Image: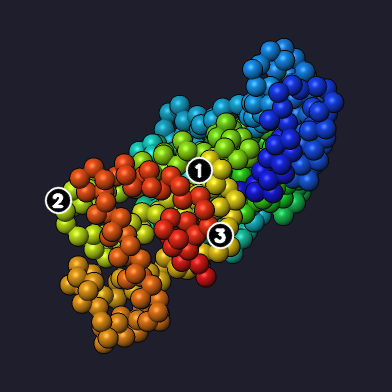
Amino acid sequence: MFQSLSDRLSQSLRSVTGKARLSEENIQDTLREVRMALLEADVALPVVKEFVESVKQRALGQEVMKSLSPGQAFLKIVQTELETVMGSANEGLNLATTPPAVIMMAGLQGAGKTTSAAKLAKLLKERDKKKVTLVSADVYRPAAIKQLETLAAEVGVDFFPSTAQQKPVDIARAAVAHAKIQFSDVLILDTAGRLAIDEAMMAEIAALHAAVKPVETLFVVDAMTGQDAAVTAKAFGETLPLTGVILTKVDADTRGGAALSVRSITGKPIKFLGVGEKIAALDPFHPDRLASRILGMGDVLSLIEEAEQKVDKDKAARLTRKIKRGQKFDLEDFRDQLQQMNNMGGITSMLDKLPGMGNMAQMAQQSIDVKLFARMEAMINSMTPRERRHPELIQGARKRRITRGSGTQVQDLNRLLKQHKQMQKMMKKMKGGGMEKMMRGMGGMGGPGGPGGMGGPGGLPFR
């Protein structure tokens, strides 16, 4: 996420962070680099000018001159100003109204409104324990209604059916009445995507807004359109009273221009980030955490929150008890670990949030076969329960049967069994207070080949 911006900024700031004294001259040189980095990241020019000027004024002020480490103080100023540009603090949804609280999704075609509506429904259901109804008022795009119905079933929320023959305003009013009968806390209304900002479609969405009076009107925009995202959001904001923005496809955006421009240009906060195709890949937006990631300092808080929400605590506790009792770590346990990591977005997502590991995440993305985990799971699923509990039984004919059943090669299975054995050894060290020793051992894993020279990050095999 925003890798090119992160690399450029880190490189620009490296020259100044170690300095014992800051002068106007060396600050100017660094700020010139920062300015170029932001412009290359497609941040809007007025935003860049204001940002650089704010940093310069504060950097030449007393807070840096009196600091024991001026370079570090300068870095802190850059981080604070990045947070300010993006909105200072997380702004959640305001659902304080008589149920159902209506959330209206607006935006251009292809920005990801329908998927974001389902992702938001899942988040509200699981995190906030809300009863949610989804409805589509998109009567123009073929199969838009069906798509939302399928996604509603996937996330397990109520869906109000509509047809392409109905008028959007009629659909919305009927959906509100239905949500009241169902005692839904929230009604999420998906609207038709606009190909461009044309008057007829804008008039329709304004009429829709007037009919249902949503408490939240969220503008969904593709982060990869850069500063154009902010310009489009501003145009929509002139027609609709927007309350916030959802930036989608952030995981694929190496630049970050949209994230740094939207708040300043529209005056509206970014409330959520779409960080992947999976239905759980919607994160609340925290400017302070994103600023930290952009500057290569990681985002451990989000990683902890993710672990708390997505890791199966019962399975984790069961495994801990098993290891403490000295029982073997079998292939069913190994499969559970793969699934838990997958739930947290995979290894690259986890590395990306650790301080100083942004480059490692990029290397892992390029080097680790992304289909590897699916193949490993398929192989374990092709085994009998007895084979999973006793991997030493897997020889000759059994290997051939497992690989045929999972569509893999014998060498893939051999690699899996070898990895499992290594993981088993690691688990043995955890028994009887060996966890501290193991963590100390992993402290020096910075060299090539990762821990134990096993190939990649966390001992994962490379392609």
Q: Earlier in the sequence, mark 2 or mark 1?
A: 2
Residue 352 location in percent, x, y?
54, 47
Which residue matches tag 2? 325
- Depth order, front residue of 141/309: 309
Secondary element type, mark 1: loop
The amino acid type, in three-letter code, at marker 3 is Gln
* Location of residue 38 (image quadrant): top right
At x 27%, y 65%, the residue is 331
Can see residue 158? no
Is 292 placed above or below 27 here? below
At x 59%, y 55%, the residue is 362
Q: Earlier in the sequence, mark 3 or mark 1?
A: 1
Secondary element type, mark 3: helix
Which residue matches tag 3? 365
The amino acid type, in three-letter code, at marker 1 is Leu
The amino acid type, in three-letter code, at marker 2 is Arg
Secondary element type, mark 2: loop
Rate crowding at label 1 as few (under 14), some (14 to 19) or many (20 or more) other CA atoms within 10 Å: many
At x 53%, y 40%, the residue is 355
